[in-house]
Amino acid sequence: MWLVVAAVCCYALGYRFYSSFIAAKILVLDAERATPAERLDNGRDFVPTNKWVVFGHHFAAIAGPGPLVGPVLAAQFGYLPGTLWLLAGGVFGGCVQDFVILLFSVRRDGKSLTEMARDEIGPVGGFIAYAAVISIIVILLGVCALVVVNALKSSPWGTFTIAMTIPIALLMGVYLRRLRPGRVLESSLLGFILVMLAIWGGKWISQTPSMAHWFTLSATSLALIIIGYGFAASALPVWLLLAPRDYLSTFVKLGTIGLLALGIVALRPTMHMPALTRFIDGSGPVFAGRVFPFAFITIACGAISGFHSLISSGTTPKLIRRETETRMVGYGAMLAESMVAIMATIAACVLQPGIYFAINSPAGIVGQTAENAAAVISGWGFPVSALDMHSLAQSVGEQSLFNRTGGAPAFAVGMAHIFSNSIGGQALMAIWYHFAIMFEALFILTVLDAGTRVGRFMLQDALGHVWRPMGRTSWYPSILVTSAMIVTAWGYFLSQGVKDPLGGINSLWPLFGIANQLLGIVALCVATTIIIKMQRARYAAVTIAPLAALVLVTFTASWHKVFDANPRIGFLAHARQLGSGGGTARLIFNDRLDAVVTSALIIMVALILVESVSRWMSGLSGRTQAEVRETPFVRTRFAEK
Amino acid sequence: MRVETVRGQGPHSTSLRSGPRRTFNTARLLMAVLREIFDESAYYRFLKRTRTERSRESYAEFLRENAIVTARRPRCC
């Protein structure tokens, strides 16, 4: 409970003083200035909206599986590094990024980050922002799909529940379109009730051998099914699958986050994870690498996430009614997300450390058998027995909880522990566990289908410049080709993770963290450039400080991931080890591909930094006329008398 | 209750008053947030703009108009 109180105090101070300082001294928020929502009000995408409504809308869009999974994985270092990064990174980094990008987009008629990068930094900046968005989408989708695969493999209960969400979403689509047009809340509630029934039915499925057989799938089978699903979700009409799933996922997400907050406050659970573990030295079983820089790329959402800048320069700026409200929406919603990440840390750290490591350690580290794994983990100083793990698995309705890497199962066990101690006791532990798994998987699959579709549109836009018909978003051959390209790209990373003897998360999650922080660097470069152009250079440290931190973290992490001599960390060292040990050519190729992707990402960071710094220097030295590309001032009709 | 009672009516439209009214306003605001998140208010705005009634046809038209916006809306990690 003290952690929650400490976090709330930090966030309150950050919001009250730091965001006020930024609003007053740097951004000079102008309550008299009309926003694009007011000037361009068309009742469709530009709509002046109440600030609390925009806050809820923005929070629902930025809160994804990242703030839940990242802190759970980083808990291998103990609760302290992750918590400190969430607090400092959130208050001084992520919130600042979201706030300034939102305001700058508002002052530019709701332009996207890539458009602002092109206009303010230059064509290289624009191209890199575009490439960063595509990269992050592909890597993100591969990693997210891997988390789902690891959570559902050999779990008939979980697989059945998630499988049922597809017909439920289709039913909701038909209900919305044919039976009760436009009643989304009503259909989401109906969908939620059906999902709860599916969770209950999953128990019966798992206890009926003839049925369980059909839903007990290997990681490879699940990966293939998810790849097929991603393709279908991208190619099918939006109203049929994507939109209802999105509504259902949002409904469950908001409800569950609220429930978790209530559960933590009501139960005040004891955290068993120490403040720091021996794994800060880089020998951690969940993922290899020292606490610096790996804790800082493992936790992105919740501290600072480049992806948020896409939302802050997407739908939200078109809804903001008054400039002064960007502070509450941009800075405030990110604080709320950071708080969700703190709750995820708590959910992971209420587990006995031995149990946490047993769930999150891959078989390649702790061995194939339960006895072996328990002995290895106990040898690290975190006692756990095969019997404890068996009882726990039984209580949550699973055959085994060993080697369930990816963070989702550990979070689900922690959440089930908190919920079952609040409501229902041990009798409901299995239901709560599968509720948590369903919640995470539903969440992730929504990111997967929305992300595949967004990637498809971006690819269609790009290919349209090469051959015009490919740019037509409703032309079916183009839809099929671009959907297949995006799905193949993230499907490759997924299959790589599934085949990885170290569990996939070890190599892919850092890659995702690097790609995400790269986008954060792009956003902060854009923000700093605009601040300097606004003649506010003396306050530019507000964005330069988090930018410098991200550059340091990203460069160091990338260096380690490519060149570190430890095969568990460095891709090239791992490829060499596989080569000398007679490993398969495919695994060696995967390592080399990861090294190339990481290098390409870091080169893009370097290029955008060079271009941005040169723009700052020429602006500060007066060599070029700094031109702020804001839309002209128009007085608002919402101004207070 | 309509969404527009808390949207676009100036800075004082949601000011919370004391007593039961505060609870009522909070509940109303919460519903407005949910309606915005779940696109119900977007449909309502569509009906108002096109001066049509809630029906299968108007909802299908709304979905067609909104398909690109919905499909291009990223979901954060």
Image (cartoon, coloured by chain):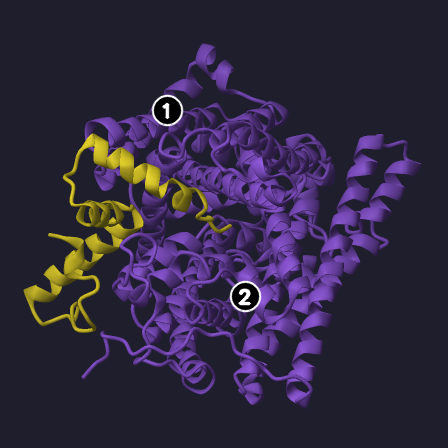
Element type at marker 2? Answer: helix
Task: Give the colour of chain B.
Answer: yellow
Say which label, 2 or 1, has the lower sequence index. Answer: 2
Instruction: Judge by depth and name the residue closer to the eye, A243 or B76.
Output: A243
Q: x%, y% of residue A561?
A: 76, 54
Instruction: Judge by depth and name the residue closer to the eye, A384 or A206.
Output: A206
Q: Is residue A85 left or right of residue A375?
A: left
Q: x%, y% of residue B26?
A: 17, 61
Q: Is residue A526 left or right of residue A336?
A: right
Q: How far, Cα to Cα, is label 2 from label 1?
A: 41 Å
Q: x%, y% of residue A543?
A: 56, 76
Quarter of the image with the C terminus of chain A in it: bottom left
Q: Please report the residue visible at 12 percent of the width from the left and 66 percent of the height from the top.
A: B22
Quarter of the image with the N terminus of chain A in it: bottom left
A393 to A218, vertically: above or below: below
Q: Please report the residue visible at 42 percent of the width from the left and 14 percent of the height from the top.
A: A208
Which chain's colour is purple? Answer: A
Q: Amino acid at mark 1?
A: Pro
Mark 2 or mark 1, whichever is nearer to me: 2
Asked whether residue A292 is in view, the answer is no
Q: Is residue A68 left or right of residue A185?
A: right
Mark 1 crowdedness (10 Å alpha carbons): few <14, some 14-19, many ≥20:
few
Mark 2 crowdedness (10 Å alpha carbons): few <14, some 14-19, many ≥20:
many
Q: x%, y% of residue A48?
A: 27, 63
Q: Please report the residue visible at 39 percent of the width from the left and 44 percent of the height from the top.
A: B70
Asked whether residue A588 is in view, the answer is yes
Element type at marker 1? Answer: helix
Label ID, residue A116: 2
- Residue underneath mark 1: A167
Label ID, residue B63: none
